Image (cartoon, helix red, strand yellow):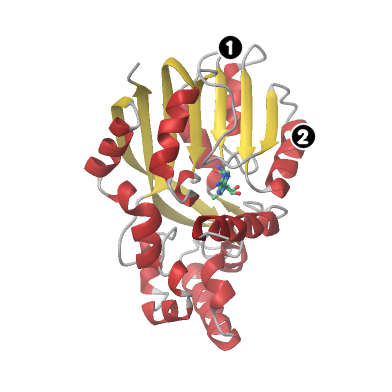
């Protein structure tokens, strides 16, 4: 198996394992981010929308609602369990104009020029060669179509995917337990470097055939019912990578520390609120 395939197999297994509890453990993050992405992308009634790496539908479902019954929203995800759960969630919310398919979002097998908008919230960051995928998304769009996606605002001194606040609580020495391929520097070099500097991001979109690039960093208010809820939730997210590789005693010590630090942020018995910087990117097809 080549490196990209091995990596995708691990990502798929991780999200299949997380699907049952993904974003449902007393923490709100992906849902407000997805809603905001749809607000920024502003799809019109009747449009055809593709959501790459749709997960449980945090972006897909509000987009489907906005385009209405004359529109069509297709969600694709590499993890079958995510697609199953998304289908249940669409049914639960009574949203009928949604189609869900298990598919590798890096190589979407879909007809050219069949969408008005391609969305991807916290998903393009998982693609081994996302810049090449952008050109494929351009091919899927009709003239004047648009792309809109989110990513973390990466910084070099924290574990990827975590709010900067956490660098105070997670000793960098713990990262030595990660296999080399999951080390933040390696992830950065292989997957995220093009997203960090807005000039690189704009250049990547330009090369893929997009123009009018808009990059806006905004905070999403992540809320967690308690420190324990946040730590349990973190096992279903990017931080799962770290938990999986920590020796039991180090994992227990980190869990206790994070719970104590997070609970100290609670206002009386209210939830914990943490502002997490998120990058929203939108662009229009040049043709
Ligand atoms: C952090 S989750 C975000 C899910 C959703 N967009 C949201 O905002 O809640 C990332 C999603 O990307 C999916 N994913 C990762 N690699 C993928 C790939 N190559 N093709 C399609 N989906 C992928 C994962 O299975 C997971 O559901």
Q: Which mark is residue 278?
A: none
Q: Is residue 184 above or below residue 54?
A: below
Please identify the quarter of the rendering in which residue 69 is found: top right
Q: CA distance from mark 2 to mark 1?
A: 22 Å
* Res. 155 image quadrant: bottom left
Q: Secondary structure at mark 1?
A: loop
Residue at (36, 59) in percent of width and height: 188
- Residue nearer the viewer, 62 or 111: 111
- Tell me where residue 231 appears, x and y as whole percent: 57, 67
Q: Closest to the observer: 93 or 142?
A: 142
The residue labelled by disc 1 is: 46
Query: How many residues crowd mark 2 within 10 Å: few (<14), some (14–19), many (20+)?
Result: few
Pointer 1: residues within 10 angstroms few (<14), some, or many (20+)?
A: some
Q: Outermost residue toward the bottom? A: 249
Q: Which residue is located at x 41 percent, y 40 percent?
A: 132
Q: Nearer the viewer, mark 2 or mark 1?
A: 1
Work out which quarter of the rendered image holds the N terminus and state it.
Answer: bottom right
Location of residue 67 in the rendering, given as x and y in whole percent from the top left corner:
58, 18
Some atom of ligand 1 lies within 8 Å of the CB belonging to the residue at label 1: no
Q: For the C terminus, which image quadrant?
A: top left
- Determine whether the residue tagged by mark 2 lies in a helix, strand or loop: helix
For this view, does 44 lie left or right of residue 150? right
Q: Left or right: 130 with respect to 14?
A: left
From the viewer's perspective, is residue 201 above or below residue 22?
above
The residue tagged 2 is 92
Q: Is residue 153 left or right of residue 234?
A: left
Residue toward you, 51 or 251: 51
Q: Residue at x 47, y 44 (%)?
A: 124
Residue 43 screen position, x and y as percent: 50, 20
Sequence-first disc among 2 and 1: 1
Q: Measuring 59% from the left and 42% from the top, which residue is drawn there?
A: 104
């Amino acid at each position: 198996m080549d490196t990209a395939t091995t990596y995708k197999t691990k990502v798929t297994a991780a999200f299949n394992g997380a699907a049952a509890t993904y974003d449902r453990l007393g923490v709100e993050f992906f849902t407000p981010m997805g809603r905001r992405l749809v607000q920024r992308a502003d799809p019109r009634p009747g449009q055809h929308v593709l959501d790459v790496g749709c997960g449980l539908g945090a972006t897909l479902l509000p987009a489907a609602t906005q385009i209405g019954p004359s529109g069509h929203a297709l969600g694709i995800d590499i993890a079958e369990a995510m697609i199953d759960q998304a289908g249940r969630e669409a049914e639960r919310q009574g949203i009928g104009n949604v189609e869900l398919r298990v598919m590798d979002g890096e190589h979407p097998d879909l007809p050219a020029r069949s969408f008005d908008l391609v969305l991807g919230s916290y998903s393009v960051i998982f693609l081994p060669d996302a810049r090449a995928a952008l050109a494929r998304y351009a091919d899927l769009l009709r003239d004047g179509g648009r792309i809109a996606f989110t990513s973390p605002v990466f910084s070099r001194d924290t574990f990827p995917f975590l709010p900067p606040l956490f660098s105070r609580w997670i000793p960098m020495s713990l990262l030595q337990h990660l296999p080399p391929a999951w080390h933040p520097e390696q992830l950065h070099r292989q997957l995220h470097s093009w997203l960090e500097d807005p000039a690189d991001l704009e250049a990547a979109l330009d090369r893929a055939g997009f123009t009018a690039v808009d990059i806006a960093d905004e905070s999403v208010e992540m809320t967690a019912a308690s420190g324990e809820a946040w730590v349990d939730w973190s096992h279903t997210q990017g931080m799962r990578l770290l938990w999986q590789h920590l020796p039991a005693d180090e994992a227990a010590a980190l869990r206790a520390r994070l719970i104590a630090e997070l609970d100290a942020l609670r206002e009386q018995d209210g939830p914990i609120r943490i502002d997490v910087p998120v990058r929203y990117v939108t662009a229009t097809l040049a043709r």
